[in-house]
Amino acid sequence: MATALLGLSVLAASSTTQASVSSKGGLTAYVTNAEDEGKAPGMGTVLPINLTDNKPETPIKVGRGSGTNDLVVTSDGKTGYVTNEGTNTVVPITLATGKLGKAIPVGAKPVAISFVPHTNERWVWVANYGGKTVSTINVVTGRLGQTISVPEVGPNTVAFTPDGRTCYVANWGTEDAAGSTVTPIRVTHGGASGRVLPSIDVGLHPNWVAVTPDGGTAYVANKGSNSITPIDVRSNTAGKAIRVPGPAIEMEISPDGRTAYVAIAGSSPEIDEVIPVDLTTTPVTVGSAIKLKPKSQPHWITFTPDGQTAYVVGNGNSTVTPITVATGKPGRPIQVTADPDSDLLAISIVQTQN
């Protein structure tokens, strides 16, 4: 991800076919694997995990040097779209077969991708970390819409309000100069374009934005400030930062909007934990840390559709750890890959059919 740039060479993704989705059905998780850890460019992949038996399945090979970073999956579980930081493309994948579609060129170092709500999964927006831009793509036609210029360096996240009217872009900055703003963009022309609004000051190295299901508040995870910043969506004003006990990598909100999980990962000292935040109180209440296995280095988090379980990607040890939300207890980590050069980042969970 943009907080640890992959630095991969630009090579075309190969077109291959592999089995990916289990015939058992149920829930399937898809995890991106940039697979480099700063070494020679490896084979970017998407790793399916059957959550019925917690077993990883055949990796989908996206291409050598692709730097597979983030993905979205259609609600029917049939198609995924992955950003490839090394090739500056978005690639569609037929998940049942692992077949790659035609790569769509976007901006420099595309990192995050998200569907625009209420466009029937027709439009996605992509944050291009290296280009100070956001690309809009019509995934039905495979064509670019608008390339939206943002005023700040290192756009790292695209997060929409549930009504699809506003997108928040977290401006991470660079390793040498931390960003400290989030830029709202008003969605126009049915998702094809947007109008940039004044940026909002938040903490250092804003790494993620999560919007509550009621659309009232956007929360910004500030990796460089060990905090989360609430933004009032109606007025686009930031509230008082909420301290968390370490670098905030990512934040995800449960489907009912009551609980948020914040991934905390650091190396000096090493921190491997998830912080629950009760969003029903005013101000919100930061709970006790959920400790993960040492060297987990949690990154992306996602909740199951029923909100009962959260799954946390361990970038440091190539695992995915389930957490029972009702108790806050982590389960046995799923070892996704034994490859020492793996670089697991994003996760998406969908309902699959028999």
Image (spheres, rainbow, N blue to C red):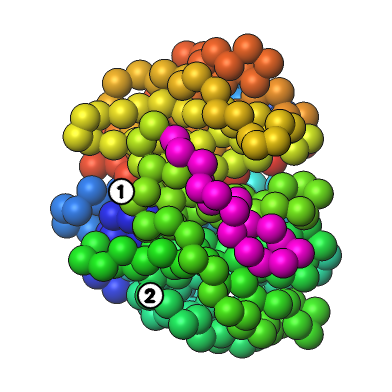
Q: Which residues are magenta?
A: 228-244
Relative vertical location of residue 58 with respect to residue 147 in this rendering, above or below: above
For the residues labelled 2 and 1, the Cα–Cα distance comes to 25 Å
**How many residues crowd mark 2 within 10 Å: few (<14), some (14–19), many (20+)?**
many
- Residue type at mark 2? Val
The one of 9 and 38 positioned closer to us in this rendering? 38
Q: Which residue is mark 2?
A: 153
313 with respect to 316 (left or right)? right
Horizontal and vertical percent for residue 352? 73, 38
Residue 114 visible, this angle: no
Residue 108 placement: quadrant: bottom left
Nearest the viewer among 309 and 256 is 256
Instruction: Return the mark for residue 35.
Output: 1
- Asked whether residue 342 is in view, the answer is yes
- Which residue is at 23% across, 48% downward? 37
* Residue 172 placement, left or right of 115: left
At horizontal 62% and vertical 80% (from top left) the residue drawn is 197
Tag 2 near tag 1, CB within 8 Å: no
Task: Please report the residue visible at 58 percent of the width from the left and 79 percent of the height from the top.
Answer: 198
Seen in the image, is 270 located left or right of residue 214?
left
Q: Nearer the viewer, mark 2 or mark 1?
A: 2
- SS class of the residue under badge 2? loop
Q: Position of residue 115 (x, y in %)?
A: 68, 63
Snapshot quadrant of residue 298 = top left
Secondary element at tag 1: loop
Disc 1 marks a residue whose amino acid type is Glu
